[in-house]
Amino acid sequence: MDFSQLFPAIAGFLGQYGDMYGWQNLVMIAVGLLLIFLAIKKQYEPTLLLPIGFGAILVNIPFSAVLTQTQGGETIVGALEVFFNAGIATEVFPLLIFIAIGAMIDFSPLFQRPMLLIFGAAAQFGIFLTMILATLCGFNLKEAASIGIIGAADGPTSIIVATQFAKNLLGPISVAAYSYMALVPIIQPPIIRLLTSKKERQMRMKFDANKKVSRTTLIVFPIAVTILAGIIAPSSLALIGFLMFGNLIRECGVLNGLSKTAQNELANIVTILLGITIASTMTGKDFVQPSTLLILGLGIIAFVFDTAGGVLIAKLINNFTKPEKRINPMIGACGISAFPMSARVIHGMGLKEDKNNYLLMPAISANVGGQIGSVIVGGLILMLVPHFM
């Protein structure tokens, strides 16, 4: 063995290793482990956090084969980058998720109290506030819009907006959107308690679970929403159209097999692929940057103000409403698009304040409104922002 060439080769390898990997990768591996802990131990949306956390570990191991590598002058494309280019960059994964979500949503509770739909608009306030803050922080308008949409708590919409407006920020934006969605049980309760009194949180709402909505109404609704959204914001059609198509599969009554597949197999498969593929952007060198921390900070601001906006609007409406028609202010927080996580959190908070206070049905109604609202806002941003550039 020629030792005179061995040591320079080792030195070259270590030099290459030092250029590509460092303490940032250890930080991201720790982040991945934390996400896995939260998914398993705390059960914070494990279907999202576990794939993202495990993927973060995969991409930060030195010379990981899941990322594209150059060996001996030959480029070997990594598996996660194949998934990313096929599913994220083309927007296929987010749109398939919309079909699955649409198939899960039951709009009938919303027809009992249509006014709850207003919270789907009210809880988008943080998006626009964060856009302003992001521009003040030096981001251009398209980047600011992509960061602001994190507040909608709608991962697929965040991915689609970022893919079209700010591909360079897609990694931190998508991770922030899905992480904050999963952390709804941590983020929302303190904000709600800060803005409401115990008496307000104990407020009961009448909801007739036996009131039926006609099948014709449930079939016409997704079609009508798609047409109306297309007229108001044509750029939203890819978003709202796939969501409403999934709902039409559910409600038409002749595609029960497809409806169950969309709600279960499709949702589970795409969620796994989406979560672990998003993690392909979480490499230490690219992710542990001041700009990433700034985006994560702005994202939480958007999320907080969206939650607060819904609660405050509910309190405002109650000032002009008869006592028997008043809305528990916590319901306003469900106007974000974290479906159905936010509704479950609000229902749980209601039971904690009063064990006989069942808020699930109105909470689901507002949460459904938030799903529609966030998609329409995303479409409006895609349509309007380029005109201001």
Image: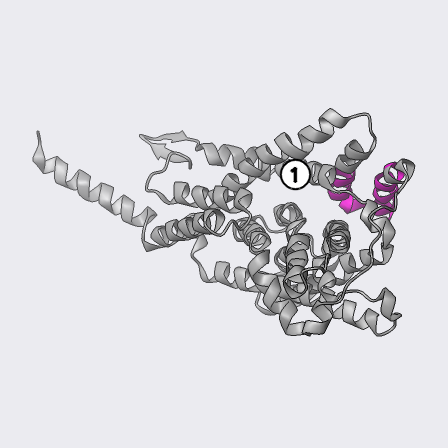
Q: Position of residue 113 (x, y in %)?
A: 85, 55
In the image, what residue occupies the spot 16% across and 41% down? 8
Quarter of the figure with the N terminus: top left
Residue 75 located left or right of residue 302? left
Identify the residue shown where x is 66% and y is 55%.
Answer: 342
Q: Looking at the picture, how far across and down is residue 234, in whole percent?
A: 81, 45
Q: Is residue 79 above or below residue 21?
A: above
Quadrant of the frame with the C terminus: bottom right
Residue 28 in sight:
yes
Please state if 332 lies on the left or on the right of 110 as rendered: left
**Measured from the top left, where is residue 16 in percent x and y?**
28, 44
| Predominant secondary structure, magenta span | helix
Mark 1 surroundings within 10 Å by alpha-carbon count, few (fewer than 14), some (14 through 19), many (20 or more): many
Residue 141 visible in the snapshot: no
Residue 299 is left or right of residue 226, and the answer is: left
**Residue with the mark numbered 1:** 97
Q: Quadrant of residue 362?
A: bottom right
Q: Which residues are magenta?
A: 219-244
